[in-house]
Image: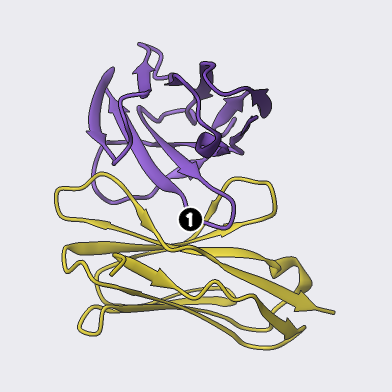
Amino acid sequence: QKEVEQDPGPLSVPEGAIVSLNCTYSNSAFQYFMWYRQYSRKGPELLMYTYSSGNKEDGRFTAQVDKSSKYISLFIRDSQPSDSATYLCAMSGGSNYKLTFGKGTLLTVNP
Amino acid sequence: DAGVTQSPTHLIKTRGQQVTLRCSPKSGHDTVSWYQQALGQGPQFIFQYYEEEERQRGNFPDRFSGHQFPNYSSELNVNALLLGDSALYLCASSPSPGVTGELFFGEGSRLTVL
């Protein structure tokens, strides 16, 4: 079993839709949870950062962490064509300095 | 404020050759990490450098080595290149070597091994 599982999609939605992206993980030591956005042939860009369980909102984006279920989510409201990208979940914790990434979900928002 | 800069952006090598990739961290950052991202995969941790020393290493062979300079810039060296080393190599910087994981990535160096 991989430490972090993420459905690679692809996911295609119409403009204005609510998008839900998810990851599950197996390592209980993870305490820091991140979502990165990666446009084609570019480096990942930090989108959301959450410590431990709970919700965090930033504009159209909401990140949720449920440590009891080892499940994290990213919601995008009123999706725009400019949101079309690969979304990577990432986690760290314990005595580890590294990030462990999911495979990424390719999202396309159609105008 | 310049972000993380990497060079070269693209390069092509043949099997058995050696390659050096370079990274300058974001201003104010002193910790540099390197990741390998194969096509269709998430980034995989190679190693992290802090205070010119390798702080932690991922599951990569000794063919992968690195260095950090006093100005915090870093190099990634890969010897005896294999076809499977073809990937996007990402450099990421952070203001401390802590475990929070809030990293800032460069655009990457795309390596093709023929």
Q: Residue at x 67, y 29 (%)?
A: B9
Which chain comes out yellow in the rendered image?
Answer: A
Q: Residue at x 46, y 49 (%)?
A: B43
Q: Chain of mark 1?
A: B
Q: Position of residue A41 (x, y in %)?
A: 68, 47
Asked if residue A47 lies left or right of residue A65, the reply is: right
Q: Nearer the viewer, residue B107 or B64?
A: B64
Q: Is residue B13 above or below residue A53?
A: above
Q: Position of residue A98 (x, y in %)?
A: 30, 46
Outermost right residue:
A111
| Percent coordinates x, y for residue A52 in the rendering | 24, 70
Task: Look at chain B in the picture and name its colour.
Answer: purple
State the residue in front, B54 or A53.
B54
Disc 1: which residue? B42
Q: Residue at x 68, y 83 (%)?
A: A78
SS of the residue under disc 1:
loop
Please name whichever residue, A21 or B96, is drawn nearer the observer in this view of the structure: A21
Q: Residue B106 versus residue A100: which sits nearer the camera?
A: A100
Q: How many marks?
A: 1
Q: Amino acid at mark 1?
A: Gly
* Image quadrant where one finds the N terminus of chain A: bottom left
**Location of residue B25 in the rendering, given as x and y in whole percent from the top left corner:** 47, 28
